């Protein structure tokens, strides 16, 4: 029976049988017991599905991964220890030394560093393109050895909105999948697979957990990318894996299962970035109310953005839900119910004004975090980007007076009153 998104948030991924626990069990065990070596051997050979060691897979994690896959409309999913691990695994499962990636330049700083610095050291080159580039510019970024395209639905912290269909068209025209980091809108507000994305990643640390309680990540495969049709580009999926007795993932597990099975069997096995079952349990508690919380984050973000827009102390406000915003039309198209609760604005008077303003806030705490129940704020110029000069900041599109605020689940009138007193005191 077809389920709507809210029902999936509450119930997908785990259906207890007669007499079993109603809430998902936390399987706090590193290992699993078998009667014969033969039984266990079948698991090692991927001939049977089951559990043998939590570094690779754990039932609690798999219940939660199955829920996130259902929310995104994918065929399979996995949890990782963090959002960083999710994006690294999603890319490295396709690209290796000598390969190339096309990525939107407007992405989370941690992911930018991962791709630009660390993956470059592994021999993977990346061409960064503006999310606003023309189709010609986008197509020109591809090379013979390009293996994937990457972007964020709503970018953290720039709040640019990606034209997912434009990026999907270009990726598919060049025979490679589109990977979308959907952390900010969550599947409640946008499901990139419905717009042509092939693989979706998450930092579940943000809205999915939603309470600032557990770092985590997730990867979902749409099952739509035809690996065998592009077998020459993806030998890792389309030729025998010697470390698994010659299994060819795309043949044995099909388009619906090959990507996640390979990612688990090779990358989780070798890098071990597993999420702890305790964290997966906490994440699932967050997911159970995701569809109730997201509309409130959007309502608060919209109210705060509109308030800030009317203040003389403010140069400009970025929020894709504001009709004057550069990304308003794209946000309306891809996120009809709104995007998220993160708003950024430039206060007049640069870093001094930003620091003085933030010191006076009572409800918005100064944090390097976004997207949980409690509102918070950050001035990049005096924190995450403090090594940069004013000129370098301006070049990066981050003026010294930029303040990023994340609207939590408090009452919007109280949030606005807090901002108002900080402007006026
Ligand atoms: C926070 C974030 C990440 C990194 O996630 P961690 O869980 O902190 O490792 C990746 N992408 C986006 C969009 C993020 O906001």
Image: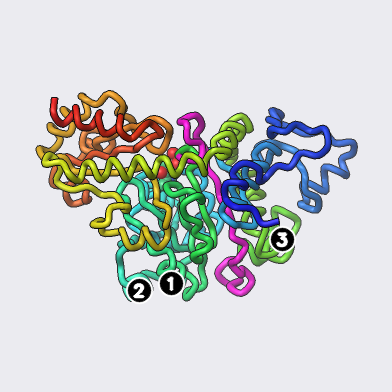
Residue 170 — which label?
Answer: 1
Residue 401 placement (x, y as % from top left): 17, 40
Residue 407 sits above or below residue 222 on the image:
above
The residue that appears at 53% across and 61% down in the rendered structure is 193
Q: Are marks 2 and 1 in contact (CB under 8 Å)?
A: yes
Q: Tell me the quadrant of the picture where the C terminus can be found.
A: top left
Say which label, 2 or 1, has the lower sequence index.
Answer: 2
Give the residues drawn in magenta, as a range. 207-234
Viewer-side residue, 33 vs 173: 173
Q: Can you identify the residue that label 2 sits on?
A: 135
Prevailing SS of the magenta stretch: loop
Viewer-closest of 300 and 370: 300
Label 3 sits on residue: 253
Query: How many numbered marks appear?
Result: 3
Which residue is rendered at x = 71% and y = 60% of the image?
253
**Real-space CA distance between mark 2 and mark 1, rounded to the nearest whole angstrom:** 7 Å
Colour theme: rainbow
Q: Quadrant of residue 255?
A: bottom right
Decide if residue 400 is in sight here. Answer: no
Image quarter hosting the N terminus? bottom right
Q: Local crowd at mark 3 within 10 Å, few (<14), some, or many (≥20)?
A: some
Q: Is residue 152 left or right of residue 353?
A: right
Pinpoint residue 81: horizontal percent, then vertical percent.
54, 38
User: Dot 2: what SS?
Assistant: helix
Q: Nearer the viewer, residue 258 or 243?
A: 258
Q: Is residue 406 magenta?
A: no
N-terminal label among 1 and 3: 1
Could you say where residue 368 lies in the image, as x and y percent from the top left? 34, 33
Binning the other alpha carbons within 10 Å of mark 1 as few (below 14), some (14 to 19) or many (20 upward) gives many
Q: Are marks 3 and 2 in contact (CB under 8 Å)?
A: no
* Residue 219 included in the magenta stretch of the image: yes
């Amino acid at each position: 029976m077809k389920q709507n998104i809210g029902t999936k948030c509450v119930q997908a991924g785990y259906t207890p049988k007669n007499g079993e626990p109603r809430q998902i069990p936390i399987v706090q065990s590193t290992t699993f017991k078998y009667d014969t070596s033969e039984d266990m051997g079948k698991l090692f050979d991927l001939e049977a599905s089951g559990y043998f060691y939590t570094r690779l897979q754990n039932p609690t994690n798999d219940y939660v991964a199955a829920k996130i896959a259902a929310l995104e409309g994918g065929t399979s999913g996995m949890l990782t220890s963090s959002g960083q691990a999710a994006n690294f695994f999603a890319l490295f499962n396709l690209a290796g030394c000598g390969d190339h990636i096309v990525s939107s330049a407007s992405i989370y700083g941690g992911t930018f560093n991962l791709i630009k610095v660390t993956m470059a050291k592994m021999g993977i080159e990346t061409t960064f393109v503006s999310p606003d580039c023309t189709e010609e510019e986008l197509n020109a970024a591809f090379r013979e050895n390009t293996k994937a395209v990457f972007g964020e639905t709503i970018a953290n912290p720039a709040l640019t909105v990606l034209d997912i269909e434009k990026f999907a068209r270009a990726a598919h025209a060049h025979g490679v999948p589109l990977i979308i980091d959907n952390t900010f809108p969550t599947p409640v507000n946008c499901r990139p697979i419905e717009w042509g994305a092939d693989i979706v990643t998450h930092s579940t640390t943000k809205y999915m957990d939603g309470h600032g309680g557990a770092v985590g990540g997730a990867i979902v495969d749409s099952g739509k990318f035809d690996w065998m049709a592009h077998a020459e580009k993806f030998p890792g999926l389309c030729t025998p894996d010697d470390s698994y007795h010659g299994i060819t993932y795309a043949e044995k597990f099909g388009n619906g299962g090959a990507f996640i099975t390979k990612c688990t069997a090779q990358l989780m096995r070798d890098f071990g970035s597993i999420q702890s079952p305790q964290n997966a349990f906490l994440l699932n508690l967050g997911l159970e109310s995701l569809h109730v919380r997201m509309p409130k984050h959007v309502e608060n973000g919209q109210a705060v953005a509109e308030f800030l827009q009317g203040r003389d102390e403010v140069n400009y406000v970025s929020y894709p839900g504001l009709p004057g915003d550069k990304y308003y039309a794209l946000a309306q198209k891809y996120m009809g119910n709104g995007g998220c609760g993160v708003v950024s604005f430039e206060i007049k008077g640069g870093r001094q004004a930003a620091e003085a303003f933030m010191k006076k806030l009572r409800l918005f705490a100064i944090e390097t975090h976004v997207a949980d129940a409690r509102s918070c704020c950050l001035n990049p110029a005096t924190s995450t980007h403090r090594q940069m000069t004013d000129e370098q900041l301006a070049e990066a599109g981050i003026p010294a007076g930029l303040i990023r605020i994340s609207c939590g689940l408090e009452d919007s009138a109280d949030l606005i009153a807090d901002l108002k007193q900080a402007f006026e005191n």
